[in-house]
Amino acid sequence: MPTRTFQENMNERFLARWFYTLFVMVNVSFAPSASFAQDDPPNAADGIGEVRTLSEYDAWVESYCQKSLAGIRLVIITVGGEEAAKAAGEGPHGPSIIQSWDNVSIDGKCWGETKSRWGLQGAGGNTVSQNDLKRLDELLANLPADGSKLPPIGRRVMIQSMRNGNGMIRVYDIANPPLEVLEIFRLSHSGLRPRTLYFRPKHEIDAASYRGDGFFGLTPDRAQIVYSDGSKMQLWEPTTRETLGVLKLELSFARNITFKPDGSLAAFVGYGECVILETQKWKRLHYVQSLSWSLTPRFTLDGKHLLLCSDEKPPVIYETATWKPVARLTDLPEEAVRFCPAIKKRLAVIQSAKGTVSLWNLDKQASVAVLDEDCGGTEAVFSPDETLVATATRGLSTNKYHWRLRVWKTDTGELLHELRPFEQTRCESLSRPLWTPDGKYLLAHSMSNTISVGISVWSLKTGRHRGEFVGAGNSMYGMEMFPENGELIAGCGDGKIRFWDFSSAINDIEEFERPFDGH
């Protein structure tokens, strides 16, 4: 099963901290077995993990805990290389071990340290706000019990803090830490990621050279892949991966393709222009110029109209039979600049020019619930049974780089989950949500760092980030599921079309989740 080991994560953390060294504070001697709050003796029926004797638990804790918490509110301790150390017959501080500490001081200053055979490295600079410090204290005061059990080797994360003058320690499984612990990871600026499955492409097509802008899609009949590098459009057969043709677009920086539901038309945009093609022979049918620079095309469900949406103005609407402009549609709320309707239910997610995102009842022409404020670029997709809707948004004015992916109940507008790549708040981009056909998982284009993109997978049962389809380069035009072949296909900005074994990946994720069922 493809996962990243603790050793790989520890190596990454070591490299991030190489540039300067912090000295470890040592002031007060600490005896963990006597001073640290522990739970009841382990019970084989209690929780998940490898049941150990209390002495083994104590020995591991004493080997790696901080012996002094003078001036420290919280320390999160991770240990990498234990498997290699065990195989080599090394002790708990042998050369294979990489130990990291993420610290939060009493006044909220954050810094990290990594100790390895190469010495002690450190990094810092973040500060926890006063409000977040209060929340952190609440979480630390109510941490779930760990049953005095050690998770499997290579999957242990230790939380150490002071509570009512006494030291408190918990050890959790990094593969499935409690939600409270995930929130502690975020509030402490630790950057810690739970164990995640990674999936690499099984095939790729060299389609074009890198240009930066482009589009990707599958025709509604799933017969053709449509890929553009921004200047020309290529057609590919998705099963044999053979080329079917190349068309010159006569349009600079083409992007954001969409199809009429019956597949007879396709529309894509450039900067301030839109082209409509008929898809039987892929001939240009209509052209619109002098529009907003940031457009998203969308056909109505009946295919009678094309909407060109942006964040600034009401949609520009055209009748697809005549290509005459239309002032407004009956279903379209007057304040909407973005409009994402359900297929069966009379519901839609709308965004106003002021950035208000609402779940909208089309029959009553009234809001079911306001989902958020000050948002731009709203995308929304309803689950296959339309009991849930996923929204991807970014900040419009005050938090322009704050991307969020959330899932809501469509009957009330209640928030079900906020989905985070690698369970971290920081994300360079988060967009293009896509449901699996059974509605059990949600996928989205994610960029958790500045150098590469991936396709993240979340479980809708738990809201946990469980997998990442990697190897997509540093930009992505779009992605589609191809259930007929059990594949996930993406058009990437480096000129390649990539194919992942989606069915096997979901099987691996379900197997990975099975031990945690109910936890």
Image (cartoon, rainbow, N blue to C red):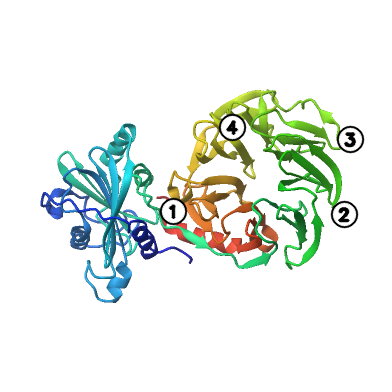
Is residue 134 among the parts visible in the rendering?
yes
Is residue 146 among the parts visible in the rendering?
no
Q: Which residue is mark 1?
A: 517
Name the kind of residue labelled 3 in the image: Thr
The residue nearer to you, when weighing 110 against 250, is 250
Q: Which residue is mark 3?
A: 322
Name the kind of residue labelled 2 in the image: Lys
Disc 1 crowd rating (10 Å Cα; few below 14, some 14-19, many 20+) is few
The residue nearer to you, when weighing 345 against 432, is 432
Q: Which residue is mark 4?
A: 411
Mark 1 or mark 3: which is in front?
3
The x and y percentages for residue 327 are 79, 25
Task: Report the residue at 54% width, 50% height from top.
Answer: 446
Mark 3 to mark 4: distance in Å?
37 Å
**Mark 1 or mark 3, which has the lower sequence index?**
3
Q: Which residue is mark 2?
A: 281
**Mark 2 or mark 3, which has the lower sequence index?**
2
**Mark 3 or mark 4, which has the lower sequence index?**
3
Q: Answer left or right for 63 relative to 495.
A: left
The x and y percentages for residue 134 are 29, 33
Name the kind of residue labelled 4 in the image: Asp
Mark 4 to mark 1: distance in Å?
27 Å
Name the kind of residue labelled 1 in the image: Asp
